[in-house]
Image (cartoon, rainbow, N blue to C red):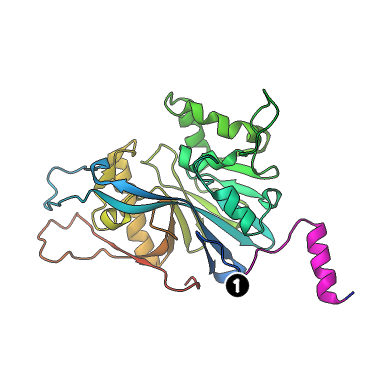
Amino acid sequence: MTRNVLALCCLCACGLLPIRAADAPVAGTMFFQGRDGVEIIAIQDAPARMKGNLFINTRPDYPIMFKLPPDWEASINVFLVRRAGESYLVDAGNAPERGSLAAKLAALGVKPEQIDAVFITHIHPDHVGGLLSGGAGAEGAAPAAQFPRAALYISRVEYDAWKNDENRQPLGRFLQPYANRLRLFAFGDRLPGGFTARSAVGHTPGHTLYALGQLWFIGDLVHAAEHQFQHPVVCARYDLDPAQAVTTRIEVMTEAARQNAVVLGAHIPFPGIGTVVGPVNLAGVTRPTEWKHFHFLPIKGNELP
């Protein structure tokens, strides 16, 4: 037996078959190579558009008038991160009947048991729905976890807020199969794989940004990228605390631009990965200095800076 065949057999025995390379592409997925051996696979769980009437200007004194289009291009993105033989998901997308995460992972050759952890930015249906298996179980059986080995990471602030939010409590069915593998953390904690949990609150009380060095997974910091990078004072009606969401959005965008961080967004048009430039001046606009505007630049190619 040759050395290469022997190595492949060992991988098979451990359940660690490598992801298929780019010569066998899977629609709705894109591969990116980062530093220190980090590989990111962007997965479009579902296409999406954000209706213009979902957005509100939180500052009545904002000096810019805009004519809103019917909608903006968006997406529902999940990110698979592979590093040092471990595999992590940032968010889990929609429930199986509305999303395609499980099917796309299977097409990539990734088995559910290969996922070591799932990092949840916040408890909304398009971020936790894919935690459940879409397979039909025995009648009366409890829902099954899609990722049978994965630990589930959620900020303690987010988890406690969810428990006290009647509107979101039904989402507990997606979390229940992971009860014995639930890991609650505080902002600032260091998590497996080298991730650091950072507060990005406003959209929800415990909305979390996961930083892996200069790779920042920003969840729902923006819902309509074409609009909200230029006008971060604009909020989606989904933001539970609009004033805090604006403050957080401007702080994160400012810091991301200053540090040349790569941001990976759950609703930025697929693949949802790019850098932030700013603050910038908008042509023909006179305004007080406290208002800030930014540009989002999608990553070109498959190499992350």
Residue at 67% x, 63% y: name it.
Answer: 84
* Residue 163 vertical position relative to residue 115 in the rendered view, above or below: above
- In percent of width and height, residue 9 lies at 83, 65
Q: Check if residue 20 falls in the magenta segment.
A: yes
Q: Give the magenta-colored segment's residue range.
A: 2-21
Quarter of the rendering occupied by the N terminus: bottom right
Residue at the spot 63% in from the left edge and 62% down from the top edge: 83
Estimate how packed mark 1 is, as few (under 14), some (14 to 19) or many (20 or more) residues with alpha carbons within 10 Å.
Answer: few
* Front residue of 86 and 52: 52
110 vs 255, nearest the viewer: 110
Q: Of 238 and 255, which appears nearest the observer?
A: 238
Residue 177, located in which quarter of the rendered image?
A: top right
Q: Is residue 170 above or below residue 205?
A: above
Q: Quadrant of residue 10?
A: bottom right
179 lies left or right of 32: right
Residue 20 shows in this picture: yes
In x, y percent, where is residue 79?
A: 53, 55
- Determine which quarter of the picture holds residue 81: bottom right
Residue found farthest to the bottom: 2
Label 1 element class: loop
Q: Which residue is mark 1?
A: 23
Whether 219 is drawn above or below 163: the answer is below
Q: Residue at x 53, y 48 (%)?
A: 100
Residue 45 spot, x, y in % from top left: 49, 50
Tell me: 179 left or right of 76. Answer: right
Question: Residue 190, can we see it?
Answer: no
Say which of 78 and 44 sits in front.
Answer: 44
Q: Amino acid at mark 1?
A: Asp
Task: Answer above or below: position of 7 versus 52.
Answer: below
Residue in the image at 68% along x and 32% along y: 137
In the image, farthest residue toward the right: 1
Queried whether the magenta region covers residue 84, the answer comes back as: no
